[in-house]
Amino acid sequence: MSSQQHYDTVARAIEYIHSRARHQPTLAEVADAVGSSESHLQRIFSAWAGISPKRFLQYLTKEYALQALHNADDLLSVSLDSGLSSPGRLHDLMISCEAMTPGEIKSGGAGVQIGYGYTDTPFGIALIGWTDRGICYLAFCSGDEVQRLDEMKSQWCSAKIEEDSNQAAQYGAQIFPTTPTPGKLHLVLRGTNFQIKVWEALLKVEPGQLVSYGQLAQQLGMPNAQRAVGTAVAKNNIGFLIPCHRVIKGTGESGNYRWGSTRKQAMHVWEGSCHRFDNG
């Protein structure tokens, strides 16, 4: 079974558990709902997420999310004040950003060559786009690969765009390695000054750490700009690498996500299990 099939099964299990959390579904009920045996679901869920379906059900009591929010004020403040993130950031990946100039944005990427390709990830198929300066697009697909490609092309209407599946696979392996390895990635950010400021702040939110829109706005020195911050978060075109999935509601609810709320929850449990939970 491919990692895409594993993700699809785990995602359906997450969605089922989330929708019935108050009824405390058993492993047998979850397995039956996703068309799997108990032992197979237990094995692939634990291998993929690092915790069992039962522990994920406990996670959905909001204890993890609320605790993460409680700690975020201090942790995020330290990160933003220092301008540094921990060595474990994105599996030891160092990320540097370069914003496009207003002229480059206005020209629609005239004179720019963009490579793109689809790659397998722990969260399903992703479309990655890049220029010679770095990654400029990363979107997760749910049977809408053509629409995602059209979206990327519309943002770079004057650029020369060519498919390169091999390079996309290399980027996928670097971003989502089986074994954490050090590396460096450059991102090309296309947005307003305000949006870029919000995205750069997101890069300082560590894996396993969740922040609310209000906390992010406050740490940016704009406590009354929660709505504007939320809009900037939603405009992010480089999924996972700019971790907008780590921003949740102040109540502890996951909230919406550009590439699907179930995928957002999957990212939370995948990252949270590595940093907050023991296997079991």
Image (spheres, rainbow, N blue to C red):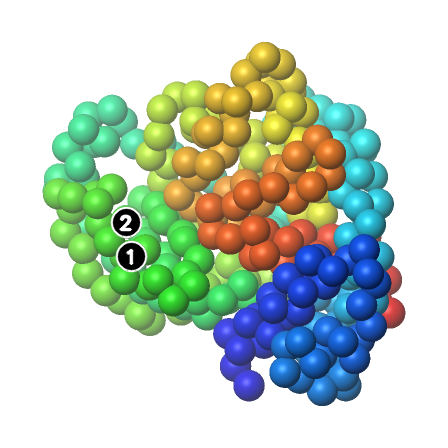
Residue that protrudes farthest toward the front in the picture: 23
Answer above or below: position of 81 versus 28: above
Answer above or below: position of 19 versus 3: above
User: Residue drawn at (84%, 57%), measured in percent from left and top?
Assistant: 58
144 or 280: nearer the viewer: 144
Q: Which residue is identified by label 1?
A: 147
3 or 28: nearer the viewer: 28
Q: Amino acid at mark 1?
A: Gln
CA–CA distance in space, label 1 to label 2: 6 Å
- The quarter of the displayed image where residue 31 is located: bottom right
Callout 2 secondary element: helix
Answer above or below: position of 217 versus 279: above
Q: Is residue 214 left or right of residue 166?
A: right
Quarter occupied by the C terminus: bottom right
Q: Is residue 208 left or right of residue 130?
A: right
Q: Are marks 1 and 2 in contact (CB under 8 Å)?
A: yes
Image disc number at residue 151:
2
